[in-house]
């Protein structure tokens, strides 16, 4: 049996790297039910916005700091909340991107919680 998280690994990275994710590398076949027909156009618009690109760069830096602190002090603080806050801050003009991010965070939350921080920073 193929591990779905492995099959969707590039798509899972979208959560942290929407600013540099190529539409062609995303496997959206499992997400047809979301109704995200405008996804590709919204991704292009998003990746053209220096404000949102910067927001995700800052989120990744904060995420890395939280994860480093968590590992150093063995605290069970979860950085996923920071990711969700960032996604929720996007305007509804990026509703397809937000739907995919929320779906991934919901469906794969236990997988994402157990991935090493280095997984998110492989680019």
Image (tube, rainbow, N blue to C red):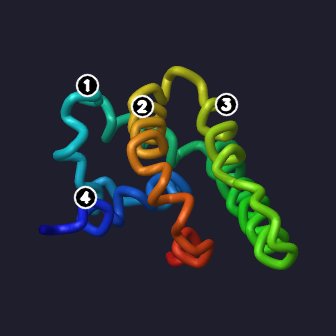
Instruction: Looking at the image, tell me whether mark 1 or mark 3 is earlier in sequence order.
Output: 1
Q: Quadrant of residue 70?
A: bottom right
* CA distance for labels 3 and 4: 25 Å
Q: Is residue 18 left or right of residue 23?
A: right
Residue 110 x %, y % = 48, 54
Instruction: Looking at the image, tell me whether mark 2 or mark 4 is earlier in sequence order.
Output: 4
Instruction: Looking at the image, tell me whether mark 2 or mark 1 is earlier in sequence order.
Output: 1
Residue at numbered disc 2: 99
Q: Residue at x 67, y 31 (%)?
A: 89
* CA distance for labels 1 and 3: 21 Å
* CA distance for labels 2 and 1: 9 Å
Towards the viewer: 84 or 48: 84
Q: Is residue 37 left or right of residue 118?
A: left
Query: CB atoms at circles 2 and 3 under 8 Å apart?
Result: no
Task: Please say whether residue 50 is visible from this viewpoint.
Answer: no
Q: Is residue 53 above or below residue 72?
A: above
Mark 3 residue crowding within 10 angstroms, few (<14) / some (14–19) / many (20+): few
Residue at numbered disc 1: 35
Q: Residue at x 68, y 61 (%)?
A: 60
* Element type where label 2 sits in the image: helix
Q: What is the total number of numbered labels drawn onto the structure image?
A: 4
Instruction: Looking at the image, tell me whether mark 3 or mark 4 is earlier in sequence order.
Output: 4
Instruction: Looking at the image, tell me whether mark 2 or mark 3 is earlier in sequence order.
Output: 3
* CA distance for labels 2 and 4: 18 Å
Towards the viewer: 5 or 100: 5
Residue 24, numbered label: 4
Image quadrant for the N terminus? bottom left
Q: Which mark lies nearer to you, 3 or 4?
A: 3
Residue 99 x %, y % = 42, 31
Q: Which mark lies nearer to you, 1 or 4?
A: 1
């Amino acid at each position: 049996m193929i591990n779905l998280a492995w099959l969707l690994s590039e798509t899972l990275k979208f959560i942290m790297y929407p600013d540099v994710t190529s539409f062609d590398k995303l496997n959206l076949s499992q997400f047809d039910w979301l109704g995200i027909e405008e996804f590709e156009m919204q991704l292009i618009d998003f990746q053209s916005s220096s404000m949102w690109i910067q927001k995700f760069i800052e989120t990744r830096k904060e995420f890395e700091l939280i994860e480093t602190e968590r590992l150093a002090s063995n605290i069970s603080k979860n950085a996923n909340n920071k990711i969700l806050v960032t996604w929720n801050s996007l305007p509804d003009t990026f509703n397809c991107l937000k739907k995919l991010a929320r779906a991934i965070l919901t469906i794969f939350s236990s997988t994402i919680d157990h991935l090493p921080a280095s997984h998110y920073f492989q680019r």
